Amino acid sequence: MRYYERIGLIEPVARNHGGHRRYAQTDLEHLKFLHCLRDSGMSIQGMQQYATLASQGHDTLGARLELLQSHKREVQARIRELEDKLAIINAKIKRFRQAE
């Protein structure tokens, strides 16, 4: 999370009197979204592009939508590739079971 803060993906978070970060629910939801993007293969640069657009306000909704739609297409393509590979693995498992 400190890394995301340092590279500008999240705003600095409020701290308590002891210096510990205090995350609000909206902070946690935003972090969950960022982790989703990263775990689904979006590059840090893509995430920074999204963050830059988001910081520019409502006028960038179209650009953010296109960025997310493009990422969605990439994720769907990877899912199709994995499904093809899974079918090959399943076929091999079926042959092994039939050979037993």
Image (cartoon, grey):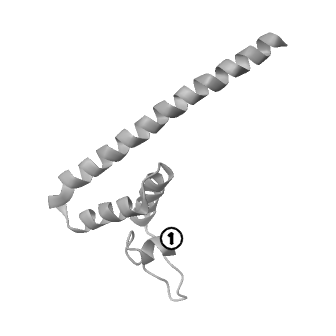
Q: Is residue 37 left or right of residue 51?
A: right
Q: Residue at x 60, y 28 (%)?
A: 86
Q: Is residue 61 left or right of residue 30?
A: left
* SS for dot 1: loop
Q: Position of residue 51 (x, y in %)?
A: 32, 65
Picture layout, residue 48 above or below residue 8 = above
Residue 96, picture quadrant? top right
Q: Position of residue 20 (x, y in %)?
A: 54, 82
Q: Position of residue 85 (x, y in %)?
A: 58, 29
Could you say which is closer to the camera, residue 66 or residue 54? 66
Residue 59, picture quadrant? bottom left
Q: Residue at x 47, y 82 (%)?
A: 15
Q: Would you call the spot at circle 1 few (<14 residues within 10 Å), some (14-19), or many (20 or more)?
A: few
Q: Which amino acid does the dot numbered 1 rest on?
A: Met
- Quarter in which the C terminus is drawn: top right
Picture layout, residue 65 above or below residue 29 = above
Q: How many marks?
A: 1
Could you say which is closer to the camera, residue 30 or residue 53? 53
Instruction: State the residue position of label 1.
Output: 1
Q: Residue at x 35, y 65 (%)?
A: 48
